[in-house]
Amino acid sequence: MLDSDDSLRLISAVGYAYANKQGLSLCGSGSKNFLGGKAQGDILSLTEHSGIIDYQPGELVLTARAGTRLDAIVALLKDNGQQLPFDPPGYGGQGTFGGALATGLSGPARVWQGSARDAVLGMRIVNGLGQHLNFGGQVLKNVAGYDVSRLMVGAFGTLGLVLSASVRLLPLPAYTRTVRLEMNMRQAHALTVKLLRSPVPLSATCLVENSLYLRFSGSEAGVSTAANQTGGETVPGAEYFWDQIRDHKHAFFTGEGLWRFSLPPAADYPEIGGEWLTEWAGAQRWLKTGASSKKEVQMMFDSAEALGGHLVYYRSGKQLSGPTENILLHRFSSLSPALVKYHQNLKQAFDPAGILNAGHMHPDI
């Protein structure tokens, strides 16, 4: 694992950009560049700012630099029987720690183990003024600056450059078992919502091609009881399946026109044609559809909002252009005018010159 502290160069680069009012496009491995709009400015790479700063297995805390590869962190934690609670996608092993926090993406256990924002204890960042700031700490009881650290998670680098972060960890489960049941979308939706409301040790769900996969994690007795009561066939080597879903390596994710609906678990499915893959007991639903006209795209965004959720377009293959692309960029995070105002106020506080990843998360941020 590369151990390199590149913080002085990064702080200097942001300070220079602020002084000269030059935009910067913050970049790790680039594995998630397909999300959002194209950030304005020169590329500032964080890949050389890498390494574990502090790891205390007994305290369930890890502190690492932003450019550290996720696969290296996961391997280290696995050797010690631990895991990142939010199990972020690495997209082929190329993802970085900072990129995982900046995008706020989580894996199949999100509903049960929490999000990236929930796991963050503290951060060191560089704001848009080139100032080196430290928020939070490295212990679970430290709440100083908690909210500021969490603001950075999912902000796509628009509020600050993340130098390093401390996150809480979880032990790997003692026992895990995945079962598969054959059922249609409506039946699977009803069952997963029921299980979500029950005390069974569920840790992941996925419905794809009329096959419902349920992962149970915990004690061997508890997992066996829950799996046997639920029924279905046990899936051998299921860890590979869940990794494929998390990293979008499953066959479902090939092709074009991939959308992510984030909805309340019990919400109905939108009346939209296409293929569905559903995770998180209904809270995350992927749709493959050929819809591309301005009217069709607007209808999908409206459907998501009507159901109490939001919609994101995951670019894959062919790029949309013209009026349709404008809608996608302006509605990347489905921000209402009121929310855009709050985001702009935060942007003004952390990056008043608007030099950090401008236009990446939203055209007006």
Image (cartoon, grey):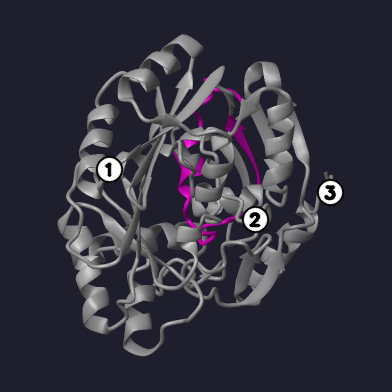
Dot label at residue 92: 2
Q: Is residue 156 magenta?
A: yes
Q: Which residues are magenta?
A: 139-168
Who's the residue at 44% across and 34% down the image? 114
Amino acid tagged 1: Met
Name the image quarter holding the N terminus.
top right
Residue 135, percent from left and from top: 57, 39
As measured in the structure, the alpha-carbon distance from the residue carrying label 3 to the one carrying label 2 is 23 Å
Amino acid tagged 2: Gly
Q: Is residue 29 magenta?
A: no
Q: Secondary structure at mark 2?
A: loop
> Does the CB distance between marks 3 and 2 fall below 8 Å?
no
Residue 96, percent from left and from top: 66, 51
Camera-side residue of 149 and 284: 284
**Residue for badge 1:** 183
Q: Earlier in the sequence, mark 1 or mark 3?
A: 3
Residue 114 as seen in the image, left or right of residue 309: right
